[in-house]
Amino acid sequence: MGSGGHGRRCATTSAVRSTRRAGASSIPPVEADAPNVVWAIDFQFDSTVDSKAIKIASMIDEHTREPLLHVVERSTTAERLVVELEGAFETPGGPPTVLRMDNGRELVCPVLQRFCDDRVGLFYIPPGTRRRFVRRQPVSSRLGHAERLRSTE
């Protein structure tokens, strides 16, 4: 009985993993050959000095490497990300032609896809091919310690 129950639990876990949603790109890969063509967004995870988890959303212009968005929170939602993107899209030169991202939970959700409809093309990096699209170290790795602490207060 003990091994049978454990086996079913593993099978269920495998089934859940295999049905994980992948983002459907609305545009083929585009070269960032000018400013405001491709903006890349990603999430990283870190912790504060008191060992509390934080989530960092960073977005850059892939051509200029200019940071366009930094959201540092204990947790975040797709709705919060859309609010931040609305502000970034209203800046001079925005929105971009393409928003490039991985298949993270907040990035493949219908909320973000609906927001981007008729505004910007979405390109989801195929699972397992991330390195091919990344040219430099993410901007979020250069976030200062002070900025992390300030946003978690």
Image (cartoon, rainbow, N blue to C red):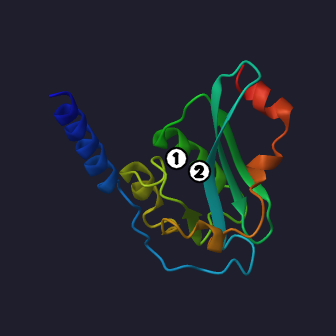
Q: Is residue 46 above or below residue 112?
A: above
Q: Residue at x 78, y 65 (%)?
A: 136
- Please rate how many residues cluster around mark 1, counting C-alpha atoms within 10 Å: few if below 14, some from 14 to 19, many from 20: some
Contact? badges 1 and 2 (CB < 8 Å): yes
Q: Which mark is residue 51?
A: none
| Residue that mark 1 sits on | 82
* Residue 146: % across, % down: 85, 30
* Residue 29: % across, % down: 55, 79
Element at badge 1? helix
Q: The disc labelled 1 sits on which kind of residue? A: Val
Q: Is residue 148 above or below residue 28?
A: above
Quadrant (top left/top right/bottom left/bottom right) for the N terminus:
top left
Q: Residue at x 47, y 77 (%)?
A: 27
Task: Name the foreground residue: 113 vs 1.
Answer: 1
Element at badge 2? helix
Task: Name the foreground residue: 12 vs 52.
Answer: 12
Quadrant (top left/top right/bottom left/bottom right) for the C terminus:
top right
CA–CA distance between discs 1 and 2? 5 Å
Q: Is residue 65 above or below residue 81?
A: below
Q: Residue at x 59, y 66 (%)?
A: 130
Dividing the picture into quarters, in which one does residue 98 lie? bottom right
Q: How many numbered callouts?
A: 2
Q: The disc labelled 2 sits on which kind of residue? A: Leu
| Residue that mark 2 sits on | 85
Dividing the picture into quarters, in which one does residue 10 lie? top left
Q: Is residue 122 left or right of residue 61?
A: left
* Residue 147: % across, % down: 81, 33
* Residue 14: % across, % down: 30, 49
Q: Residue at x 44, y 70 (%)?
A: 25
